[in-house]
Each structure stands twice: as structure tokens, then as C-alpha cells.
Image (cartoon, rainbow, N blue to C red):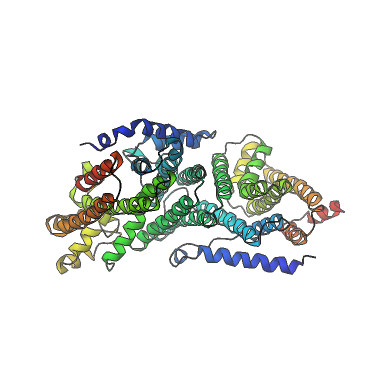
Amino acid sequence: MKLNLMYSFLNTDLQLIEKELEQAIQSDKQLLQEASLHLLQAGGKRIRPIFVLLAAKFGDYNVNKIKHVAVALELIHMASLVHDDVIDDAELRRGKPTIKAKWDNKIAMYTGDYIFARAIELMTKIEHPDAHRILSNTLVELTKGEIEQIKDKFDFDQDLRTYLRRIKRKTAILIAASCQLGSIASGASKEVSHSLYLFGYYVGMSFQITDDILDFTATEEQLGKPAGSDLLQGNITLPVLYAMKDTNFKDKVLNVNENTHRDELQELIQYIKQSESIDRSIALSDHYLNKAFKELEKLPNNVAKRTLNNIAKFIGKRKY
Amino acid sequence: MVLVEDVQIHISNLKEKIQEKIQHNYLFHHIPYPIIDEDKILILHSLLEPLSLTKEKKEQYILSTMLAQIALDTHEEVHSHNDMDEKQFKAQQLTVLAGDFFSGLYFQLLANAEDIPMIRTLAHSIKEINEYKITLYQNGISKMDDLLDCIRNIESSLIQGVSDYVDEAIWSDLSGNILLLKRLVNERELFIQKKPSLLVDNIKKLIELDKSYKEEIINIFDEYIAKLWKMIHSVLAGIPHTNFLKERLASFVNELPFSTNLYAEEG
């Protein structure tokens, strides 16, 4: 089943979110308007709004209230992508020129800050102090995760714990917060909100591990970038950590640095693909996914629960 | 009676608290420590001090506004292109993230204080400031007064937001004028030292240049500085307990060659 068919019952609400997103970034400054729209039209899976809406189904679902959370979270995600493209010096995103490539870093920084502020401003329509506490903590942790990623680059001494903490901060907590905030804004019980938070967290961990596996196993066409890009950039991901148990591999990978050419990595990528490190990484991803399913079991039965279950399965099986 | 020394100590304490908040054990090994603008702390203190808010609330407003300001100032340090060596590029990456981190901190501070209206106020100001920054960066302004308004808003929208929120309209204009004055004094100096200045680039575009444009630009700066100085002093004269602020203002303009005239006009 295709991902978008799983939540087709949300289509009307997702269309509303799309309109609200467009409205949220309206500016009478032409360039800002153009840059923000450029980003919006590049699309995306809108996975965070989907999690917000589904989680809200466990409370008193009112799309006119929930939409503020859904839009704010997607805007935060968009703003962080604009800044990430400056950090990564990225020319393309989803096949389109990035804001920093089409204009420059300064315009990207101003646009990102503008969208980010707009997101927070929108979020204040939710008068629930916990929601702001959760979101602000998430944002601080998210940035700490990104700083750690830079700190840990080419650090081959890092262990599994460091990797897991990094992907928690980098990916899992924003998905977890999407689920938790959706349920809080709809007035769901604390127990339900907590289970949804944990569900989002486990799914997020599994999602990022799968992403890190696919960086080695998927094709350049599927990834939109050459395989092994993470390693080339110095990001030590789970398959590399597992593969380093082999001292032969470890000796070779220790030579990878900022000046390593893509071609020199081919042997290492082949080794990772053929070694058991991929299977071990899949096993850890599945472990998190199973924990996510267990959290779901605690929730009342409804269409949102079934959909979250299907989305989690999809994330576990995705090939790119 | 409020002693200048007491205000000075209070400002230093607030600065220390900001430093504690932005503390990070990795960032500042690679990027410069942010400049914490004590004049902005002083303006916030001066506008909030007479109000019947709790001490904690006043402190929250000052700290959160300054964190938002530091976030904006940090992002201002990001270069327009990435043509740089590895070390500089790493610093550039961390500068982007540091700004995001400081921005998260203002939100976190107010969220923990459960002050949703102030979160809204600061977020709205940040949004506006970035709109003005883009306009300035594009050299897209056609009148001198609009250009100065743009600078005024970039410098003071956060503090103006706070003063509007606490219903201190007098401080809204006053803070805008003080911070514009300070910026003009700094930009005048940059221009004399032949350093790059977005404001001067915009001014050059606005006036018809001839061989004596250097003198003309200095004249423009001096004319506006004198005008602002007069306006600020007439307003400050009606606000008690602002001696320290007046002293600080005097220090901005003391180095200017025409500063004696400013004091003379003031009488």
C-alpha cells in the first residue's frame, strides 16, 4: 500500500494544512515571499502534520485548532531545512535548487529565521503551557543534536550510545513531539499523550536507522545523491559502527577524512553492503519498530491507531 | 534615589545570567563568543524598572529578549557564500547552529515561565526584523527616511515589541531612536575606516554621487545624529532615573568631532 493511501481519510484536512502553510508564509516583501513559496512548492511528505492529525484523533479532534500545531511543526521542519542547506552547502533539495543556491546564504538565513519565527507565533494560538514547554525543549535538543553531529564528524572512536543519542536528537524527538503535541492540543489524556510520544520516538529512531542503512544499500537514483555520502561527509552511522568490529575494515576506515575522494570509498561501501552490519542495523531498526507497535497496543482502537500502525510498518519496510 | 553604580551592577548581573544561559562546552572553541549588547540590556532595564511587574518577570523579559537578539546577531555573522577554508567552513556551520540554539533558548525560557503572550510578542518582532533585513540586504529602499526606519526597526523591533506589550509607548519611539543613533555612530566610523557597510551602500544608491561624496555621506550621518540626539534628550528629560542611560548616550557621541555642538544646543 502506498503511504498516501494509508491516510486518505485525512485528505481534506491535509489540503487545509497546505493552504494554511501557504498563508502562514505570506509576506509583502517580494523576495521573502518568493523564497518561502519556492520551499513550500518543493513539497515533502508532510509527515509531521500527518502525525499531528493522527495523534489528535485520540482526543477531541478539531482541525481548526489542531491545524496551528500541524502548520507550526511543518514550518519548523522547513526552516531547519533552509538552514541545513547552508550548513551542508547543498545546491539541490528534492531536485530543486536550494534557497542558498538560488539566492545566497544570507537570504537563506533570513528566510529560515522568518519561517521559524512565524512557526512559533502560530504555535502561540495553542494556549496550553505544556505544548510550548515540549516544543521549545525539542527545538533546543534538536539543535544540540546537530551541533553534536558536527562535533562527532570523522570521530571513529564514538560508540553506539553516542550514535543513538545523536539520532534521537536529530530525528526522533521531532516526530515524537509531533505525536505528543497533536494529542495535547486535542485534550487527550496524559497516558495517551505519553504513549504517542514514545510511539513517535521509536518510529523516529527506526526511521533514521533505516535512512542510514539506505545510504549504503539504495541506488544513487533512489537516494538523489551517491551512496555512502554520509561516510564521505564524516557522519559515522550505525552500519559503519557495526562494520568496525572487523579490525581489517576499521584500519581502512580510519583513513577516511575530509580529503578522501568518493572513489576511494567504494571498497568500504562494498564491504559494508556484504557484511552482517546491514542485517544487524536492520535488526536494531526492527527492535525500535516493535517497541513502537507495543506502545500502540496501549491506545484505544480507532482508525488513527490502525493508520499509525500501517505507517510504522511502511517506515520499517521502505526501500528508499 | 537610584544610584548609577547600582544600575551598573544590575546590568552586569543580567549579563552574567545571559552568559550562563548560552554556555556551551563545544561551540565557543570554534566560533567567537557573542557580543552581549549592554546598551540594549540598559534600555530594557530602564523601561521595565518603574513597572509593577515582579522582579522575576522583569528579568525573564530582559533575558529572553536578549537571547532572541543574540540569536539574530549570531546569524548576521553567516557569510553570504561558502568560499572558505575547512576551519572557516566549520565555524560557518556552527554559527548557523549557534543562532538556532540561542533562538531555542529564548523560547524555552518563556515556555518554562508559561508566558505565551511574550513568546508571541518576540516571535512577531523576529519575523518583522527578518523582513527588514532582507529589504536592506537587497538595497531595495528608495527614500532616506525609509532607509533609516528600516535600520531603526532592525535594531529595535524586539525592544519596541516589549515596550508595546507592557504599554510603555514612550519607550517604543525612544528605544528606536537611541538604537538608531548608536547604529549611525558605528556605521559612520565604519565608513571613515573604509570598512564594508550595508547602510552606506544603501545611502550611496539614494544620493547622486559626485567627487565629494565622502563629505556628503559624513554630513548625512552628522545631520541625523544631531537630530536624533535632540529628540532623545528632550524625551529623556521627562523620565526620572535615567542618568545612567544619559551617560551611556553621551559616550556614543563623545568621540564625534561635532559633539561639543550637540551639548551646546542642548543648553
Q: Is residue A220 left or right of residue B192?
A: left
Front-most of residues A204 and B102: A204
Provide residue B35's location: percent of width, then percent of height: 57, 60
- Relative to A108, residue A130 above or below: below
Res. B145 image quadrant: top right
Q: Is residue A237 left or right of residue A82?
A: left
Front-most of residues A268 and A163: A163
Q: Assign the C terminus of chain A to one quadrant of the image.
A: top left
**Residue at the location (41% across, 51% down)?**
B83
Q: Residue furthest left?
A: A274
Provide residue B135's location: percent of width, then percent of height: 56, 39
**Residue at the location (26% across, 42% down)?**
A306
- Relative to B16, residue B169 above or below: above
Front-most of residues A57 and A5: A57
Provide residue A240's location: percent of width, then percent of height: 22, 60
- Total labels: the figure holds 0
Provide residue A64's location: percent of width, then percent of height: 45, 35
Res. A66 image quadrant: top left
Q: Assign the N terminus of chain A to one quadrant of the image.
A: top left
Q: Residue furthest right?
A: B267
Asked if residue A224 shows in the view, the reply is no
Asked if residue A108 shows in the view, the reply is yes
Res. B210 image quadrant: top right
Q: Is residue B176 left or right of residue B123?
A: right
**Residue at the location (68% across, 53% down)?**
B182
